[in-house]
Image (tube, rainbow, N blue to C red):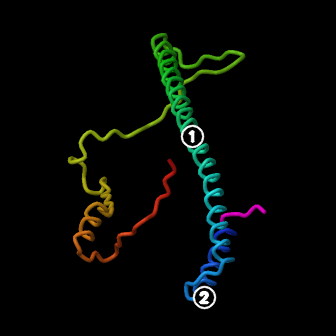
Amino acid sequence: MKQSLFQIEQEYKDIAEQLIELEGEPTFELEAALIINQQNLETKSTNYGIVIKQMDYEVGIIDSEIKRLNALKKQRINAIERLENNIQNAMEIFGVSEIKTPLMKLSFRKSESVEVENIDLLDKEFVVEKTTFAADKTKIKTAIKEGRTVQGATLQINNNLQIK
């Protein structure tokens, strides 16, 4: 009979409750059930571990492919910018503001942007103050480990599964 990890865990809890009721004296049946339950858990966990390791390997491959594709994307963006600059420079040199062909139209569109050369010289009405706050988790962790109480923060211990 195939069991999920949840079912194995539930069965183990039931056995543990029975052991508590028997004040820690296991019957032959309970000992056998514990051994079978542990074997099921080990087998199921090993199978899960194999799947996790395979998926982790695939994530590495996907990350590598993302890096490769991002590099290709960056190359194309740079090529586009160079080609656009070449066309723009040529049109400006020849004094052409628009090129129309059956396939496309190339023209200039005017836009405006503000360049701030020195923010210190601006009147206060033209300056926006931005303030951000972030917790210094390293200092908080050190303080808690030293035995100090830090209101608004706790040190949480996590169990991180390792599969080797």
Residue 91 coordinates in the image, percent (x, y): 50, 15
Give the secondary structure at mark 1: helix
Q: Amino acid at mark 2?
A: Leu
Q: Residue at x 60, y 88 (%)?
A: 22
Image: magenta residue range: 1-5
Contact flag, marks 1 and 2 (Cβ < 8 Å): no
Nearer the observer, 49 or 130: 49
User: For mark 1, does the 10 Å Cα neighbourhood hold few (<14), some (14 to 19), or many (20 or more) residues?
Assistant: few
In the image, residue 18 sits, relative to residue 102, either above or below, namely below
Corner quadrant of residue 125: bottom left
Q: Earlier in the sequence, mark 1 or mark 2?
A: 2
- Assign the N terminus to one quadrant of the image: bottom right
Dominant secondary-structure state across the stretch colored magenta: loop
Residues at marks 1 and 2, CA–CA distance in whole angstroms: 47 Å
- Give left or right: position of 67 versus 12: left
Looking at the image, the residue that sits furthest to the front is 28
Q: Residue at x 67, y 72 (%)?
A: 33
Name the amino acid type tagged 1: Tyr
Q: Which residue is tagged 1?
A: 57
Residue 31 rendering spot, x and y as whole percentages: 63, 74
Dot 2 surroundings within 10 Å: few (below 14), some, or many (20 or more)?
Answer: few
Residue 126 drawn at (x, y percent): 31, 53
Q: Which is nearer the eye, 92 or 37? A: 37
Instruction: Say what secondary structure mark 2 lies in.
Output: loop
Along the line of sight, which residue is nearer the eye, 26 or 120?
Answer: 26
